[in-house]
Amino acid sequence: MKVFITIICSIILLGCNSSAENKRYITESSGNINTISVVSDNMLWEGKVGSAIRSVFAAPSQGLPQDEPLFTIRQIPLQVFDGFATKNRLILKVSQSDSSSLNIYRNVYAKPQTVVDLRATSPQELITILNNNSEKIIDAFTKEEVKEKL
């Protein structure tokens, strides 16, 4: 009986490996293929920043017999970007901030997911950063969509 209890205790102790990584569960992403959720203030979206975003991401695709946009764009106000809206596969967050930055993150709210966080001190600077990095952002979004299609 002592041998049996010793074996059971050993199995339990080995199963409780404290050095194992604590992995958080990430839900599956959702959304249509080639659809970007643009998270921005309504004032930015309705102004020159929104026009710049539309001109970059809704530009016609090359090599198609008829004009089709690179991406379908949906705008989500920052105030309602919560819950199910965070599970979209492609997210572009655009906001004014005290400092300027462009960061590309993977699998933040869901998996697979690409989140581009664009911040700048003024609307004009947002447009400049967007235009200077448009190829990099499109490439990141396109790679995510290729993974999803496979």
Image (tube, rainbow, N blue to C red):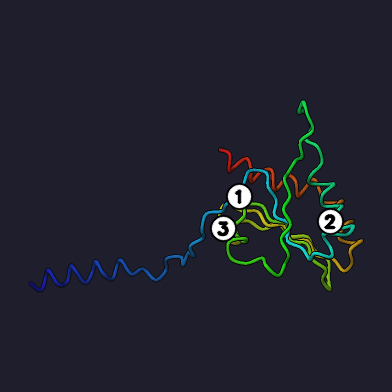
Between 75 and 5, the residue placed more toward the observer is 75
11, above or below 67, in the image: below
Q: Position of residue 150 (x, y in %)?
A: 56, 38
Residue where numbered disc 3 is placed: 110
Q: Could you tell which of marks 3 and 2 lies nearer the N-terminus?
A: 2
Report how far apart the C-alphas of labels 3 and 2 lie in the structure.
Answer: 25 Å
Separation (CA) of disc 1 from disc 2: 21 Å
Q: Secondary structure at mark 3?
A: strand
First reached walking from the N terminus: tag 1 or tag 2: 1
Report the residue at 82% width, 52% height from top: 53
Kind of element beneath mark 2: helix
Q: CA distance from mark 3 to mark 1?
A: 11 Å
Which mark lies nearer to you, 3 or 1?
1
* Residue 13 image offset from top left, x and y in percent: 28, 71
- Where residue 19 sits, quadrant-wise, is bottom left
Q: Report if the CB atoms under discs 3 and 1 are less than 8 Å apart.
A: no
Front-lying residue, 6 or 92:
92
Residue at the location (86% across, 58% down)?
Answer: 49
Residue type for callout 3: Ala
| Left or right relative to 122: residue 30 | left
Please identify the quarter of the rendering in which residue 42 is found.
bottom right
Q: Which residue is mark 1?
A: 31
Camera-near label (3 vs 2) is 2
* Residue on which disc 2 sits: 50
Against 100, residue 67 (above or below) is: above
User: In the rendering, at what x and y percent does residue 133 appear?
Assistant: 82, 51
Res. 109 mark: none
- The quadrant of the image that shows the N terminus is bottom left
